[in-house]
Image (cartoon, rainbow, N blue to C red):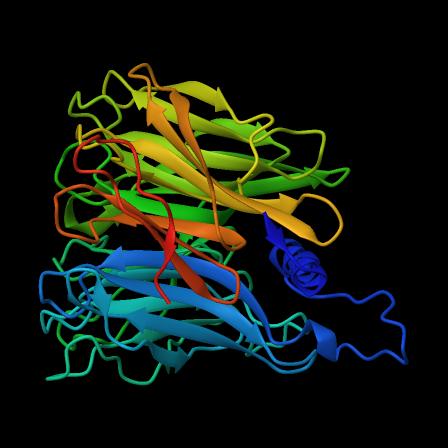
Amino acid sequence: MIQGVLRFARYLAIIGCCVLGFITIVATGGGGDDSWLFPLWVPTDVLVADIDGDGRADVVTLAQLGSSMSAREGRLVVRLQTSPGAFAPAQTYIVGIYPWRMALDDIDGDGAADLVITDVGSPQSTSTDQSVWLLLQETGNPGHFLAPQRLAVNPTNPDDVVIGDVSGDLVPDIVVADSPNLGRGATLLVQDATLRGTFLAPALIPLPGDATNVAIGDVNGDGLKDLVFRMFLSRTDYVPSTELGVVYQQPAGVLAPAVTLSPQAGLNTEVLAIANYDTNGLADVVEFFTPSSTSYRAKVTTMMQNPLGWFAAVDTSLSGVKGIDGGVVADLNGDGRPDFASVGFSPAGWGEVDSTLNIFMQNGSGGFSRTATIAMPVSASRVAAGDINGDGLNDLVALGGDNQVVLLLQSAATHGTFQPPHLLN
């Protein structure tokens, strides 16, 4: 249990940030002094990948740092692993105001991974607040990034982003789950294949609704990257209605109209992943939902593809499960099949916060069964998976607290179980 009245108050503020995108202080007392609240970290994303090409997994995190009610900025932190279990001092980059999601790939073709970051901006929502940023790795300095470049797109709600070739020219493009001033759908930034690192004018991927989440992968097995979107359709009495849209890439980079499925009401998508759940050679879709109100319950839904082009939903209820702010779909026991983990925090009494990480192994039929509940040392809300120690097994990396990283190494002796969490920084 994480104790401390100040930390509890900051927890409440983080809830305001995460749910509303801003902080509202109703009454502070003492003449309105809110200095007790700051500095305030709001973690938003974490990934595990070999950034500098040395064969070791590194850790990259995103968060917003507020130093006052009017001073907030985004922080990208890169932690490079220099030897097994040892990390160099963290590199920090200022990126926008409220960086939300990131994607990693070699954009400019130099063999080094680059970053694309969405920025949902400030509560004032000026025309320049919401952004999409490109950070290229510095030539000759592996693991270090050049200053962020703001791409020529004016998003309104850039909630998610993926990188991949969706134009058929073998060069990675960028897809943003947002459709500013172009109509309902998502935004496509096609990279100029003749001038790597630059992009053509933003184009609309038309959809029946507004894209809020996106995943990329070969859904139909033709070797081309397809797109899966969660789309917002409408809201009735504050209850959102959404559905999935599968956009298949056809030869020559043509994107077919969306095939819709999996309508939902009262739920928000936290994780959307393309994965072969049952190893039958057909890609499936796994989605982690959190409730939009107390009238609904969290769940994980697997859209099982069989036969090709046909999907059947299998739900795993998370009713009563604590620790559901963030999640990840990954193989967590070394059997080659995707499992699921979630993490989050909640009040446990005045001045106290519980933070929990849950492990769910797939049951082979489309569902997941919880196998472990792990108490976390900080108020973690984001989690990623990757092989930190190079033993061929995925470990878990959680982000929370004051931008703190927590490592959970998978046991080499007992696959699917994890060593006690410990702080990286």
Name the residue at 49% across, 75% down.
74
Q: Quadrant of the C terminus?
A: bottom left
Residue 241 or residue 255, whichever sits in front: 241
Q: Is residue 419 left or right of residue 260?
A: left
Name the residue at 15% across, 69% down.
193
- Residue 88, image x, y percentages: 24, 75
- Residue 50, image x, y percentages: 18, 62
Q: Is residue 153 above or below residue 413?
A: below
Residue 211 or residue 381, whichever sits in front: 381
Q: Is residue 235 left or right of residue 159?
A: right
- Residue 325, image x, y percentages: 53, 45
Res 172 seen here: yes
Q: Is residue 318 left or right of residue 122?
A: left
Name the residue at 35% across, 81% down.
149
Classify residue 306 by image quadrant. Answer: top left
Classify residue 15 by image quadrant. Answer: bottom right
Q: Is residue 9 left or right of residue 339?
A: right
Name the residue at 70% across, 78% down.
69
Q: Is residue 107 above or below residue 168?
A: below
- Residue 387, image x, y percentages: 20, 49
